[in-house]
Amino acid sequence: MLLSLVLHMYSMRYLLPGVVLLGSAPTYVLAWGVWRLLSALLPARIYQAVDDRLYWVYQSTVLFFFENYTGVQILLYGDLPKNKENIIYLANHQSTVDWVVADILAIRQNALGHVRYVLKDRLKWLPLYGCYFSQHGGIYVKRSAKFNERDMRRKLQSYVDAGTPMYLVIFPEGTRYNPGQTKLLSASQTFAAQQEFLCKECPTIHIHIARIDKKDVPEEQEYMRRWLHERFEIKDKLLIEFFDSPDPERRNKFPGKCVHSKLSLKKTLPSLLILSGLTAGMLTTEAGRKLYVNTWLYGTLLGCLWVTIRA
């Protein structure tokens, strides 16, 4: 019976991250809301510094599960700066967890709290976090003809004027999933299974970083568009070489030196203990449980109302 219990618990271990991260959402939003009220009369830079630290706590909890808990191996290639700096992070969009890869790199630069995203518009309806992401500096955009360039420029300029530290994450490829493309989805899933992308046991993530100085990026729109296409052509060639190189020695690796980067528990475990401890403490009392439920309910409703007004 004991062995059966152990095996059952082991099979359920992948539920734990979701339970902790989703379950702690009201705790996090409450903490942020209290700070937002307390800082109303303080300089914006003070509010931003504490908000960035709160964001660090939650995202490093995400990375505890993603790196330390799962045992995933992170292999880095290219030029990853060790110090904080303002960055525009352009990446290909291959999976649902691509945003976590941005966190993986940011925490290794001690800039995890500075991560802000350009997000597709419908994500603003996420319970609790839909409203918070825009408060943290995220920018919601609509695709194609509905894209409001002037609004995006205005928001970005406001962050520049305020001196807001930015690790701005953009996925220029946009949509990576279309349920109507059944043949393409089937082929993709077959390929993923063959390459063991769906394997849950200690997967490996290869990350290639190309750091480009601001002066090397064209500012004129026509040249910028061509430059961006060229960067993604380079990316596609790297991926083709990675998966399909005729030389077995060059397959399943990127060119250049590879660094196996292991994230220290010191950077993630304290955040997990703080966030889960506060949540557990709230749930131990009747008043805390009511506050928890009301935060889910009214926080979501107020958040949706806020993003509707601000849209």
Image: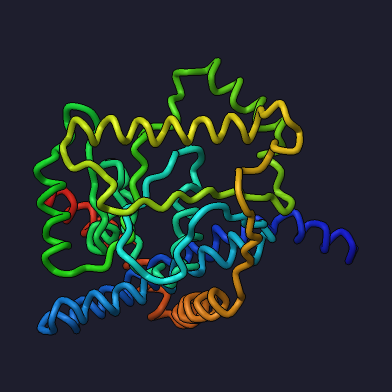
Q: Residue furthest top?
A: 183
Residue 186 at x, y percent in the picture: 60, 21
Q: Nearer the viewer, residue 183 or 266?
A: 266
Q: Quadrant of residue 48?
A: bottom left
Whether residue 302 is visible here, answered yes or no, is yes
Specify whether residue 128 is in view: no
Q: Who is closer to the viewer here, 100 or 233?
A: 233
**Residue appearing at x 67%, y 29% in the figure:** 245
Colour scheme in use: rainbow
Q: Quadrant of residue 290?
A: bottom left
Q: Decide: is 232 above or below 133.
A: above
- Which x, y percent locates residue 212? 36, 51
Q: How many marks?
A: 0
Residue at horizontal 36%, vertical 76%?
53
From the viewer's perspective, is 199 left or right of 5?
left
Residue 238 position within the rendered picture, expressed as x and y whole percent measured from the top left: 55, 35
Image point (45%, 55%), residue name: 102
x, y percent for residue 207: 55, 49
**Quadrant location, the N terminus:** bottom right
Comparing 172 with 224, the one in front is: 224
Q: Residue at x 50, y 37 (%)?
A: 94
